[in-house]
Image: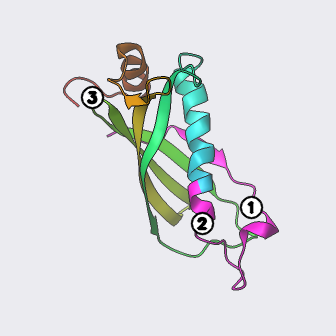
Amino acid sequence: MSDYRIGVPIQLRFADTDALGHVNNANFLSYFEMARVAYFAEVMGNVIDWKERGIILARSEVDYRIPLFLEDKPIVKVRCSKIGNKSFVMSYRIEEGEKVYAEGNTVMVCFDFINNLPFAMPEEWKNKIEAFEGLGQNA
């Protein structure tokens, strides 16, 4: 599994916090989404037609490590950690220096929006991810 090569700074907002003063857990999935969008833009470029055949989120998991506060300056890092036939796993880490606020994974599924069905990941997509992540046939 490769290191995280994409990191997106998070601009925390007062609205992200709850009555205890820390960032509400529901916001972490939005931060993961921000990183995922940056990843797709950098790695996939314009090869995905989001109106016909794209990618949907099938599963999310978050492990919360320490509270995140408004004054913190976190970065959400993202990578593709596993590629299957019709799906792949994105891994995330929200960190600041040595602090790790949360880690998580999402399962992403290649999806045909016209026929409303999953489909096998195109070789072009797979090749782009493998090249970026340093994953290969034997990884």
When asked about the image quadrant of residue 14, the answer is bottom right
Tell me which amino acid carries mark 1.
Leu
In the displayed structure, does residue 58 sit left or right of residue 100? left
Q: Going 71% across and 78% down the picture, which residue do you hit?
A: 18
Q: Residue furthest left?
A: 138
Gap in angstroms between the C-alphas marked 2 and 1: 13 Å
Above-or-below relation of 119 to 29: above
Tell me which amino acid carries mark 3.
Asn
When asked about the image quadrant of residue 122, the answer is top left
Report the disc number at residue 85: 3
Give percent across and percent down for residue 70. Answer: 74, 70
Residue annotated with mark 2: 26
The kind of secondary structure the magenta stretch mainly shows is loop
Boundaries of the magenta span:
1-29
Tell me which amino acid carries mark 2.
Ala
Q: Is residue 10 magenta?
A: yes
| Among numbered discs 1 and 3, the one appearing first in the sequence | 1
Gap in angstroms between the C-alphas marked 1 and 3: 36 Å
Residue annotated with mark 1: 12
| Among numbered discs 2 and 1, the one appearing first in the sequence | 1
In the displayed structure, does residue 65 sit left or right of residue 76? left
Give percent across and percent down for residue 26. Answer: 60, 66
| Among numbered discs 3 and 2, the one appearing first in the sequence | 2
Give percent across and percent down for residue 121. Answer: 35, 23
